[in-house]
Amino acid sequence: MASLHRDPEPGSEFLPPEHPEVLDFLGRDAASGFAKLDAELVRVLEDLIDVLIARQVIRITDLPAEAQNKLFARKNFRERRSSHALRLYGDSEDGILPTGLVEL
């Protein structure tokens, strides 16, 4: 009988979370690798659409309403998420760099 524990158990063997046997036990396989690649590709496509719109190659209204809604939802989510991120290199609204940093 196989089991998986968060904490060490006497007589058990430690395997890192990314070990193939752990992933197999959890029902995760190569498909999770594809999911990561798909997520990265979605980000690339999203950026590509932004560039095409900025260069006036296409208009957002050229896209189907469902696509527009999904793009706006992702953009709003990313903006909300980044607003909670640390601002380490002069991202302040006044444009002043933190003490000790020099703009190149």
Image (cartoon, grey):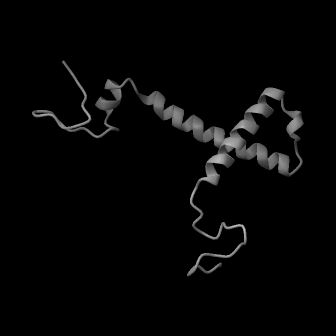
Q: Is residue 45 visible?
A: no
- Where residue 37 appears, x then y in whole percent? 55, 37
Residue at (26% x, 35% y) in the render:
6
Quadrant of the snapshot with the N terminus: top left
Q: How many numbered circles are shown?
A: 0
Establish if 98 lies above or below 15.
below
- Residue 85 lies left or right of residue 77; in this view the side is left
Residue at (67% x, 67% y) in the render:
92
Farthest left residue? 11
- Where residue 41 appears, x then y in whole percent? 62, 39
Residue at (32% x, 32% y) in the render:
20
Establish if 27 lies above or below 15.
above
Q: Is residue 2 visible?
A: yes
Quadrant of the snapshot with the C terminus: bottom right
- Where residue 71 appears, x then y in whole percent? 74, 37
Q: Nearer the viewer, residue 39 or 80?
A: 80
- Residue 103 lies left or right of residue 55; in this view the side is left
- Residue 63 lies left or right of residue 10; in this view the side is right
Farthest top residue? 1
Residue at (80% x, 33% y) in the render:
68
- Where residue 51 appears, x then y in whole percent? 79, 49
